Amino acid sequence: MAKILFWRKRKKERKPGEWKRKLVSRDTVLVCFAGVLLVAAVVASVWKEYSAEWRQIQKEFVQLVAEKFGPEKAAKIELGIKQIWIPALGRVDRCPTCHMALEWKGFEEEELPFVTHPVPELIEKHPFLKFGCSICHGGQGYALRVDDAHGWVDERDWPDILMSAAIAEDYVMKDPTAPIQVQCNLCHRYERDTKGMELLNKAKALVRKKGCRACHIIHGRGGTIGPDLTYEGDKCPEEFDFTHVVGFHSVFNWHVEHLRNAKRVVPTSVMPEFRFTREEAQAIALLMMSWRKVDLPPEYIPGAMPKEKVSPEELAREEAMMKGPGGIFVKKGCFTCHSVSVFKVFSPTNLGPELSIAAKDVPIRYQGRSLEEFLKNPVGTMSFVLKTPQYRWKSDEEREEFVRKLYEAQEKVNELEEKGLPLPTPEEL
């Protein structure tokens, strides 16, 4: 009873609104604590962004350029995420973010990722802006962490690993470039012989020689005794029974052992013994892994789009234009869209404006910008065109030569106008 009276007395002694002040005080502590956590999260996020490994790699590349070519050259390097978007392939490749020296001369002897692409002639036929990187090399093109991009994990848990020399080592193959031929065959699968794909060319010859189509459908043609192999490369490791496979349980190893001794890997198999050597089995295994269902536009598949034949007359006209005073416009490919009539260079399409009057026309079209300024920093359609491998300037000297020729063309136009003469026509060629 005394205890109850004590607490009642204590309750009466409390000041009005005291409980509200305590509640406010408690909320203040909680809000402050949450604020500290928020600030810490923001700081951690900023630190993570600015300490990303790709930023460190870019800093190392800038230092390397400064050592090789001087600080002025290094200062001109644009930093940040480099991205190639190829809508036709549905791919986004950010590989150049780290591999910044791909098209640089002078880095041929450097280590990855600071090395020039080892086969420049392949880049000429497979320009980065059209093909990107991952369609040829595999890997996750949109990733920015090395492990994520290259897939340096158990290949059985990764759908699209980088076809590197490390994979060749895992596959115990003599040729370190062999795995990348899997990627090459995504586009070249219908060719019998492709330069640079010697191992898969050999595999294709073996498939024909051994009559694999007698039992298997390949590319829509063949027998039905065995499974359809047209898209064999799309199968996941979970679709294979590794019970009788000796060694590493990978799709590649399953195919190699199955090709060499089908009944040991699949006891119920009726596949005959072909006595393939290990190298032959490896070649065919890679070939089958390349048979994937990839959505490719027709122009990416060699032979899918027949080339239009050029008549002797057209060849003669192009040769005459090439040898004329406007030959550089033909050689560069400008005449595909533009005529330079004053030099007797005529476009078959005339999609772009007449370049004979470009020196006068450019300042009118682009608010007083000079021809030199426009060709150095183009806008509109030309800003894209002059970034493509075919049309980008090889040097400042090349750009200046085009400027000089365009001013020369304008002078000739002025002379014709003073004489009251029209520009030459295609019939005069």
Image (cartoon, rainbow, N blue to C red):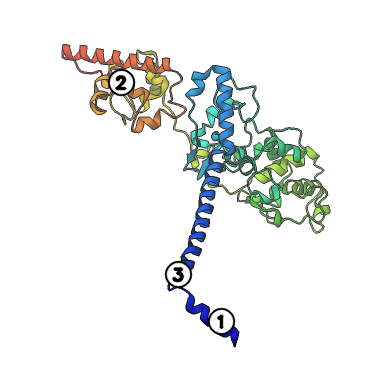
Q: Quadrant of residue 362?
A: top left
| Label of residue 6 in the image | 1
- Viewer can see residue 320: no
The residue beneath circle 3 is 20
- Mark 3, mark 1: which one is toward the viewer? 1
Helix, strand or loop at label 2? It is: helix
Identity, as a three-letter code, of the amino acid under mark 1? Phe
In this view of the protein, which residue sits in the foreground, 358 or 375?
Answer: 375
Identity, as a three-letter code, of the amino acid under mark 3? Lys
Picture coordinates of residue 51, whole percent (x, y): 57, 38
**Residue name at image x 47 percent, y 43 percent:** 88
Helix, strand or loop at label 3? It is: helix
**Residue name at image x 46 percent, y 20 percent:** 394
Judge the density around disc 3: few (<14), some (14-19), many (≥20) Cα neighbours within 10 Å.
Answer: few
Q: Is residue 46 left or right of residue 254?
A: left
The residue beneath circle 2 is 371
